[in-house]
Image (cartoon, rainbow, N blue to C red):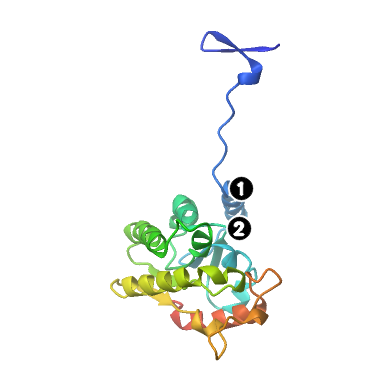
Amino acid sequence: MKWLRINGFYKPLATRPKQPQAPPFYKDILAFKKQDAQQAPPANGILLVGSSSFTKWTDVQEYFPGYPIINRGFGGSTLPDVIRYAYDIILPYKPKQVLIYCGENDLASGEEVTAAVVVQRFKTLYGIIRQNLPNATISFVSIKPSPVRAHIQPKVKVANREIQAWLKTKKNAQFIDIYDAMLDANKNMREELYVGDRLHMKPEGYAIWKKLITPYLVK
């Protein structure tokens, strides 16, 4: 048996303490930092941050020509993840506008994550951004209706409604409602807007987002 000396004592190598693991999505954040080092993002930009609906919008700049878009969505993230990395991928860019799409993964993670939990998490993120970027416009893109997550739609609707009501009380804040536009005339979810996983969108879905988001973009 091999032994390891720690603080003057010998311990079997098999009991060597494990190295602490990096927090979730740390590799994504390092990739963003490397990208920034190779090519500086635009100053006074419009920052997209949140989960995979932004991550997979890889051609988002083509949807909004003439606007300085910075996409820092990282797939699978929840609001606590975005809060954790706010000082890495939001504040350093000093954007003039922050578009947030997040909360859907939170609600899908378990019954214990209620609409009220998501609203409180969003308020925390909003507070961090507002405290450090007092002049930035903060825009929340409503949680979308994903067919594979039909079972959480009651929570989604409550979270959207409460976040919208709260943002109405704030300055330089916007709620961008994309929910109803992604439903058909009978208020059913439109399967044709989504890829095979029934969660992520086809270009047709993003075309709806473009139409609804464009009027809110800060020039």
Whichever of labels 1 and 2 marks the residue nearer the N terminus, that label is 1
Residue 65 image point, x, y percent: 58, 79
Mark 1 neighbour class, 10 Å CA radius: few under 14, some 14 to 19, many 20 or more: few
Please, what is the three-letter code of the amino acid marked with disc 1? Answer: Lys
What is the count of numbered marks? Answer: 2
In this rendering, is residue 37 above or below 95?
Answer: above
Asked which quadrant contains residue 55, the reply is bottom right
Q: Residue at x 57, y 24 (%)?
A: 17
Element carrying mark 2? loop
| Residue density around tag 2, few if under 14, some if 14–19, many if 20 or more, within 10 Å | few
Nearer to me, 86 or 184 = 184
Q: Position of residue 128 (x, y in %)?
A: 36, 56
Tag of residue 27: 1
Mark 2, residue position = 39
User: Is 208 in front, or is 66?
Assistant: 208
> In which quarter of the view is residue 193 placed?
bottom right
Q: Which residue occupies the foreground of this view, 219 or 87?
A: 87
Q: Position of residue 44 (x, y in %)?
A: 45, 66
Quarter in which the N terminus is drawn: top right
**Which amino acid lies under the numbered mark 2 shown in the image of this protein?**
Gln
Could you tell me how far apart the alpha carbons at marks 1 and 2 are, in whole angstroms? 18 Å
In this view, 90 is above or below 56: above
Point out residue 194 in the picture as x, y percentages from the top left corner: 66, 75
